[in-house]
Image: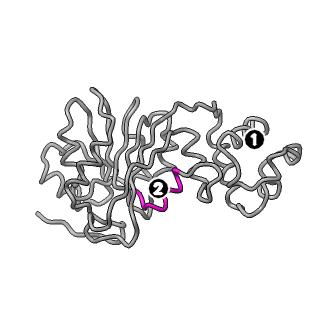
Amino acid sequence: MQYTLKKSLGQHFLHDENMCQKIVEQLTVKEGMQLVEVGPGGGAITKYLIELKGITFKAIEVDDEKVVYLKKTYPVLQDKIILQDILKADVPYEGKFSLIGNFPYNISSPILFKVLDWEEQVEEVIGMFQKEVALRVAAGPGSKQPGILSILIQAFFKVEYLFDVNENCFTPPPKVKSGVLRLTNINNPHGISDKRKFIILVKGAFNQRRKTLRNALKSYLPAEALSHPLMDKRAEQLTVSDFVELHKQFQQ
């Protein structure tokens, strides 16, 4: 049985077996762990994931044709695939779980916001992204690349840029470079008490990133916040700890 490529879903299928295995090898596999693959597509890494011993596996796939293909090709998947859009999906497990996927590039940022929604349960993420997005998520303070996602993800996860993935590893080859990240949950070390408010604060700062925070955040924070020394800076000049300081001082 064959399947078709759907450009509308941003599908680029990984065909390089060495790369498929290399991605799977990045997972921290533990006895009894719960794992979910996002967007298994034609099963490029799925076939290796279902061979992992002592784990519980599920996959979330929006393309019904791929679900039929996967179930026929890998009978073990009969009751392990959730036919749903990951962005609309309910949390797939009770308790802790890990995520892996060759994430569709057109929804990779929303997927990371989904990871933030599920952050209290997500132990680890191994994900392939457009390289530009991956580097931005991994960007450190003082670089030109930090943004909303680098601050928000690094507030809750250790981020490691693992390796590049060549365009020729895919069918069809994408027009952009790809890279694989590992996100490791660091158990909310800053003690952020209201994730929703923290996200609003960071988004507000970066949505007007050319302005100082005094101008960018004046509608988000009380008047007394505007005299804080950090208000003279622009969003990309702040560290995660700086944003946490503003959150704790003025949003609680």
Amino acid marked by disc 2 = Ala
Amino acid marked by disc 1 = Leu
Q: Would you say 40 lies left or right of 111 here?
A: left
Q: Position of residue 131 (x, y in %)?
A: 44, 60
Q: Would you say 75 lies left or right of 84 here?
A: left
Residues shaded magenta? 129-138
What quarter of the picture does the C terminus occupy? top right
What quarter of the picture does the N terminus occupy? bottom left
Q: Residue at x 32, y 42 (%)?
A: 26
Residue farthest toward the top in the current orientation of the protein? 31
Q: Residue at x 40, y 29 (%)?
A: 95
In primary-sequence order, the first of circles 1 and 2 is 2
User: In the rendered image, which quarter is residue 125 located in?
Assistant: top left
Distance CA(mark 1)–CA(mark 2): 26 Å
Q: Which residue is mark 1?
A: 246
Q: Which residue is mark 2?
A: 134
